[in-house]
Amino acid sequence: MSTAGVQVRTTEGAVVMNQEEPKQLRPQLQEIVSDLLALKTMAKDGTIMTHHSQRELVKHLSPRDLADVARAVSETEKRQQPICNRTK
């Protein structure tokens, strides 16, 4: 599996790396993402506080794994959002 990305030069001269394909998460991390999304769904009505539970799920992760989980949660939430509510 290739992780090579495409380099894009901006007008300021900085190079931005865009990955062509999303990273596949390990099964353990996929389970954590699912649990976090379930907790966030439970907390939407405001009657259940899930911050402590969310923290307990991710406290043992390495910084790289934590970033991967955060990215996966963010991408999943964007896909679940209705089109009329999306902003660019």
Image: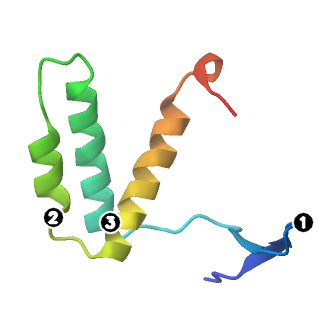
> Neighbour class for label 1 at 10 Å: few (<14), some, many (≥20)?
few
Q: Which mark is residue 11?
A: 1
Amino acid at circle 2? Lys
* Residue 6 lies in quadrant: bottom right
Question: Are the residues tagged 1 and 2 within 8 Å (C-beta)?
Answer: no
Q: Is residue 87 left or right of residue 49?
A: right
Q: Is residue 30 left or right of residue 16?
A: left
User: Mark 2 or mark 3, which has the lower sequence index?
Assistant: 2
Give the foreground label among 1 and 2.
1
> Neighbour class for label 3 at 10 Å: few (<14), some, many (≥20)?
some
Above or below 87: residue 29: below
Residue 56 placement (x, y as % from top left): 10, 55
Amino acid at circle 3? Leu
The residue under the point 27% across, 22% down is 44
- Residue highlighted by disc 3: 66
- Residue highlighted by disc 2: 59
